[in-house]
């Protein structure tokens, strides 16, 4: 009996020691005396205070804490504090990712201390635990990743709760009734985090915008934008400023530019495009060479630094292309009118003009501001018909007159000759180690209410590749022109690092199960074998999966002032010059190029590097929103096909389910392992498979299977499938 009392006292003492250490860790730079510690712990009786004093002396003797002033203690300075980014998985596991540290630090739920996914946190690292895992505790939140969240509200008499799926949240928001903006149960709302009291399980929030009823089309689209902090309308003052701009073509301005209005010029764009930010011109020279111009909307003529229009464009940094709409970077008066190179209109442009011989070699180049006139607008399909048939026709937007018909005939000749040059440029690029990612793009046929009626796959044909090659030529040449200047000039580059060895090894491990392999001896052989892989899978059941995995194995392309080249394109210099209507980095490139053409000094590297980082971040957010809108539309499309069976390919296998991509429409959903009723299935990581314990039936990555839609959740953008079985 006495022993039991002794053990209990020791446990009590250990608990108090750990509690005090945890308290000191949370604010390890601030000294505490025993009274402050007692108050923090809510222990105010004399016995507890004496116990705290004794424990402090014990911890000091053990070297865990230091007495820096009489009766004031801090944690002994330690290398155990690190700073990193919080990563909480959708299944609730927390890890802190620390730069330049090989292993991630595991954080138990009880040690998150109100940190949320993406937060920058300070962590106290414990000793390595059994099993090799390094464990830690969040001691301070340095910076919140976000303070605004999209969720669905549940309202009661005196308060409300907002559930926010999609953020790896392990709690909901408590909202006082006075701060709900009169939202009703079932509304999607944007909630702001106002605080998180020490002893509360949920943060306190305020509803700052009611987005509409969950599940309604516009509500869900606006929710996607709000989730990533992307706007869907312009502030009134920005619209007013843009509408007051003088967008007329002035003789005084024309005199400052190279006049190309009489040179044959045309645009080739998607059929449903509303902004045309690039045009091509073609002229045969007396020496037998060709003069080819790449003409880009001169956005920087209208968008001036220091204006509210420029501030808004910078903040947005990119247009966002959702399934049913475009959220433009610039107001419509610019994006669809003044800066859009529409047929039969004079426009201010910024041009890259090349003299090329029949081998597609550049023998001369010129960059500068121009004024152009577009003779015709072609859809890709129309340009493709010219390439395939060698014959001309009247584009739909051209009225039939002798003059315009003649222009049409000359455009046919121009398109055919430029197609031949583009094919040479492309072949040369591939021979230098460029990688050809022509991933299948899913497009939806929408009715007048934006409901998906059907799905089609967008192909990249010769007409697309013609435009691509000349845009690449302009981008590369502009970057090379500035990049080779001496002394060195600050510039905005689009860079793409070499792929990570571990990711390539993981890709190899998966594709070998389908009979493919990579040659990773050096950069050139890796690129060449990747291209062969992408060619070999065309038309195969595993094509989309392999394409996706190959893209994921690549590094992300980003904007920076530090040029390292572009691995995927096999260019030593590359930038974005050709789309300033929809990308802010292109606006920066135009400004810098003109500054250097005028003999100006080098711009601030620090300022432009910061701008590049912001542009890269916004590009990623826009990409996430675009992907979510596709997922939403896929779920919406599948709502009408619940009782239908579909053939698909297993695109992922985990310990909780099998992901299946339907072959006919590329919609992806999950079969939960618990829903496989014919056996108990166990995940086998090495085999990329789940295996039945009794039947030994195997569902493996890449297998062809038949599934049926079990549930389509528009709010969570998630499809649940029922497994019918393997394709016979």
Image (cartoon, rainbow, N blue to C red):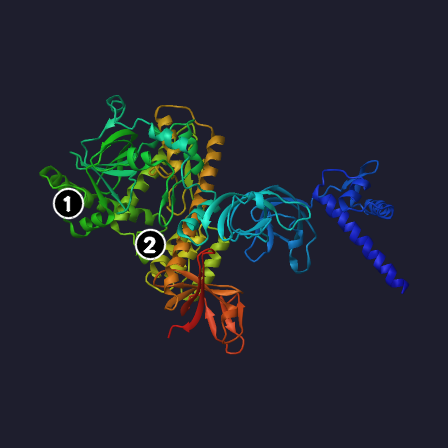
| 691 up-or-down from 356: above or below | below
Picture quarter with the N terminus? bottom right
Q: Residues within 10 Å of mark 2 (few under 14, many from 20)?
A: some
Query: For numbered disc 1, what is the local secondary structure?
Result: loop
Measure the C-alpha gap from mark 1 to mark 2. Answer: 27 Å
What residue sits right under mark 2 in the picture? Answer: 443
Residue visible at 23% across and 50% down in the picture: 381
Query: Can you give x and y, in whole percent of width and height, for residue 53 in the image?
Result: 85, 44
Query: For numbered disc 2, what is the local secondary structure?
Result: strand
Query: Can you give x and y, in whole percent of width and height, for residue 168 in the image?
Result: 55, 53
Picture quarter with the C terminus? bottom left
Q: Is residue 382 left or right of residue 296?
A: left
| 552 up-or-down from 317: above or below | below
| 138 up-or-down from 677: above or below | above
| 12 up-or-down from 118: above or below | below
What residue sits right under mark 1 in the picture? Answer: 394
Residue visible at 42% across and 73% down in the picture: 725
Query: Can you give x and y, in whole percent of width and height, for residue 450 in the image?
Result: 34, 52
Query: Can you give x and y, in whole percent of width and height, for residue 84 in the image?
Result: 60, 45
């Amino acid at each position: 009996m006495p022993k039991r009392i002794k053990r209990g006292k020791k446990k009590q003492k250990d608990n108090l020691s750990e509690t005090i250490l945890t308290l000191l860790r949370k604010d390890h730079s601030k000294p505490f005396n025993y009274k402050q510690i007692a108050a923090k712990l809510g222990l105010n009786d004399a016995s507890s205070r004496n116990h705290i004093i004794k424990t402090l002396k014990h911890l000091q003797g053990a070297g865990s804490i230091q007495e820096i002033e009489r009766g004031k203690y801090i944690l002994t300075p330690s290398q155990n504090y690190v700073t990193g980014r919080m990563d909480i998985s959708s299944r609730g596991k927390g890890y802190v990712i620390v730069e330049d540290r090989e292993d991630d630090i595991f954080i138990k739920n009880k040690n998150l201390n109100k940190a949320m996914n993406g937060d920058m946190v300070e962590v106290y690292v414990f000793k390595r635990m059994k099993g090799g895992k390094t464990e830690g505790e969040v001691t301070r939140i340095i910076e919140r990743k976000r303070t605004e969240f999209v969720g669905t509200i549940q309202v009661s008499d005196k308060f409300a709760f907002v559930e926010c799926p999609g953020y790896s949240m392990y709690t909901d928001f408590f909202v006082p009734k006075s701060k709900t903006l009169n939202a009703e149960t079932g509304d999607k709302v944007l909630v702001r985090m106002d605080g998180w009291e020490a002893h509360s399980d949920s943060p306190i929030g305020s509803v700052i915008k009611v987005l509409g009823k969950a599940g309604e089309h516009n509500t869900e689209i606006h929710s996607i934008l709000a989730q990533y902090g992307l706007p869907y309308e312009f502030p009134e003052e920005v619209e007013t400023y843009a509408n007051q701009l003088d967008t007329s073509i002035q003789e005084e301005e024309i005199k400052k530019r190279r006049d190309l209005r009489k040179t044959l010029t045309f645009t080739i764009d998607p059929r449903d495009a509303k902004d045309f930010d690039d045009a091509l011109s073609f002229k045969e020279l007396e020496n037998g060479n060709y003069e080819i111009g790449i003409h880009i909307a001169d956005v920087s003529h209208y968008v001036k630094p220091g204006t509210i229009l420029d501030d808004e464009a910078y903040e947005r940094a990119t247009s966002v292309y959702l399934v049913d709409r475009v959220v433009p970077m610039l107001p419509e008066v610019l994006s669809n009118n003044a800066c859009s190179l529409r047929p039969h209109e004079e426009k201010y442009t910024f041009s890259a003009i090349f003299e090329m011989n029949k081998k597609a070699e550049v023998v001369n180049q010129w960059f500068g501001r121009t004024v152009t006139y577009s003779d015709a607008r072609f859809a890709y399909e129309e340009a493709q018909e010219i390439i395939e048939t060698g014959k001309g026709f009247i584009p739909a937007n051209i009225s039939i007159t002798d003059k315009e018909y003649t222009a049409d005939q000359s455009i046919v000749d121009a398109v055919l000759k430029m197609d031949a040059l583009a094919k040479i440029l492309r072949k040369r690029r591939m021979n230098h180690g460029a990688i050809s990612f022509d991933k299948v793009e899913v497009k939806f046929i929408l009715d007048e209410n934006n409901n998906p009626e059907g799905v089609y796959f967008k192909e990249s044909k010769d007409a697309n590749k013609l435009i691509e090659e000349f845009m690449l030529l302009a981008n590369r040449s502009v970057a090379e022109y500035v990049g080779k200047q001496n002394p060195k000039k600050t510039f905005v580059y689009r860079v793409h690092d070499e792929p990570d060895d571990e990711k390539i090894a993981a890709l190899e491990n998966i594709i070998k199960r389908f009979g493919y392999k990579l040659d990773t001896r050096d950069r050139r052989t890796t690129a060449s074998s990747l291209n062969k892989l992408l060619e070999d899978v065309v038309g195969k059941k595993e094509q989309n999966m392999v394409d996706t995995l190959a893209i994921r194995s690549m590094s992300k392309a980003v904007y920076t002032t530090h040029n390292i080249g572009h691995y995927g394109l096999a260019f030593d210099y590359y930038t974005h010059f050709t789309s300033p209507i929809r990308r802010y980095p292109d606006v920066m490139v135009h400004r810098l190029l003109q500054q250097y053409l005028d003999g100006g000094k080098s711009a601030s590297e620090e300022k432009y590097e910061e701008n590049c980082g912001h542009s890269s971040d916004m590009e990623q957010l826009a990409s996430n929103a675009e992907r979510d809108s596709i997922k939403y539309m896929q779920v919406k499309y599948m709502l009408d096909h619940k009782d239908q069976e579909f053939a698909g390919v297993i695109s992922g296998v985990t310990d909780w389910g099998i992901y299946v991509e339907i072959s006919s429409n590329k919609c992806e959903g999950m079969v939960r392992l618990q829903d496989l009723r014919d056996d108990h299935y166990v995940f086998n990581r090495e085999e990329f498979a789940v295996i039945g314990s009794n039947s030994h039936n195997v569902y493996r990555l890449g297998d062809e299977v038949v599934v049926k839609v079990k549930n389509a959740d528009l709010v969570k953008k998630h499809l649940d499938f029922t497994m019918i079985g393997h394709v016979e």
